[in-house]
Amino acid sequence: MEIIEQAKSKVNRVKRDDDSSLASSPDSARKRRKKITSPSPTSSPLPASVLHSRNPLPLSPRRSPSTPKPHKPLPTFYTPNSGGMGRRRSQSAPLPLLPTTLDPLPPWPSHPLLYPEFSTHCKDLIPLPSFYLPKIYSLLSPTPTDGVTESQFETFAKTNLIWSLDEIYYNLTKSPSSPHLLPSSFRPILTSLLSHHPGLTFLSSHTDFQQKYIDTVIARIFYECDEEGLGYLTRRMCRKGKVWEAFEEVGREEDINKVLRFFSYEHFYVLYCRFWELDLNRDYKITKPDLLKYGDHSLSNLIVERIFTHARRFNGIINPDEMCYEDFIFFMLSEENKQSPVSVKYWFDILDVDGDGVLNLKDMKSFYNVQSHRMQCLGHEVVPFEDVLCQMYDLIKPKSEVGVVVEDFLQPECDKVSGALFDALFNLNKYLQFESRDPFLERTKREDEFDNDWDRYACVDYNRLAMEEEQREDDRNQMEIEWEGGEGDNNMNIGE
Ligand SMILES: [Ca+2]
Ligand SMILES: [Ca+2]
């Protein structure tokens, strides 16, 4: 049982690391403040009525719409080997666990353990969140009624739990028959998450939405990590994308909406509702006319055409007429978070019409011509292309005069402004907003609690959608009261 003790020591070390990082990081300070502000649950399961309301999904039970945002915390001074979420410890090399002398393990019962007993007995022996236990049980006991013996568990621990944490996550998430992690590899684990996580149990009576939630998490993981569109993830890609750090966070954080990377229910709500609004014929596909309606018709015809023919797709297959829900997630995350490197690459490939890896004058002018024509039609003052270009070059400072390359956009000092060039080329509403630069909005953005535009957008949009939904619910209740009152009057009249 030495190997089990080693596994347990790892769990304890992980917990200690978590505690110390929670005590010091600005992220954790922000999260603690947010926890104070969670109000009481709103109406969650909406069985039949959800299908007829404008938004199809139940609201998150932990909504905090009217809470003022806290001030951004002052940055802490540099501390070696510390930092925010995802930098708690190195996971780069497969390191064997170190033996320690911690609490003695409970003796393994003489009989094979069936799942409920197995999960209670082993939850502290496995250095992964408890939603991994069903998968591990199914590996050890392919027939659920067989149970797991001590020697089976010991053999499993010796083979699987001796590596670094990211190796353990990777190996236990992927299918044993596949060399890599496929989108489908995540399904059993995420299904288990839905039944284990206290922030997701309110979805238990909505099987359809549970599947959509799983689709969303998988698409978000692949959006961030599978930049080449390979359709699978390697160990290195997961490590670079800090996938397992997000899994650890969702394992210990009870409020699902605080896990902003991949798992937030509020983020899922926004993505799915915005898709649902555009997919009017409910075939789970978006067409070009549908996408033109996105963001109050903010996108030009030309960019929508290019999105359908050249944007990165979830399954790597371009369909010039349709995009599926996952493709829409790729689009929306890119559209609402233009400062992220993944988004920059997404838009760059679309805008680089001749495909030479440089955004030159010709590439950009074709898009700006369409944009300026729309401005003219809507009665806005049209800024000449050369002036826009000068303004943008001043902001981005490309290294070559020939044009802008991806690396120019990715310079650290550019991340707040590179989206402005994209908006100038194809998003009319955001470009006009940028041109009118509201100093109050700019200041609010600088001082708010969010690290990126997507998190900021999702929070605002969720609160907006939720308020609309609550208003509709109030209207429905009011109508029912009035109807019942009217019926009462009628009955009285009939009685008289
Ligand atoms: Ca459709
Ligand atoms: Ca080009």
Image (spheres, rainbow, N blue to C red):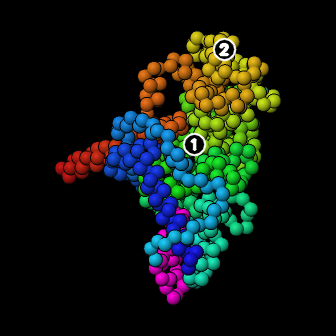
Residue under the image location 60 percent in, 73 percent down: 157
Q: State the predominant SS element of the stretch in magenta.
A: loop
**In the image, is residue 187 above or below residue 156?**
above
Is residue 144 visible to the viewer in this orientation of the structure? no
Q: Which mark is residue 129?
A: none
Numbered disc total = 2
| Residue at mark 1 | 275
**In the image, is residue 442 above or below residue 168?**
above
Looking at the image, tell me whether mark 1 or mark 2 is earlier in sequence order. Answer: 1
Q: Are marks 1 and 2 in contact (CB under 8 Å)?
A: no
Quadrant position of residue 411: top right
- Say whether residue 120 is magenta: yes
Gap between marks 1 and 2 measured at Cα: 36 Å
Residue under the image location 59 percent in, 33 percent down: 339
Please name which of the two marks, 1 or 2, marks the residue nearer to the observer: 2
Q: Quadrant of the N terminus?
A: bottom right
- Pick out the residue farthest to the left: 496
Residue under the image location 81 percent in, 30 percent down: 356
The magenta stretch is 105-131
| Residue at mark 2 | 390
- Say whether residue 78 is magenta: no
The x, y position of residue 300, in whole percent, is 65, 26
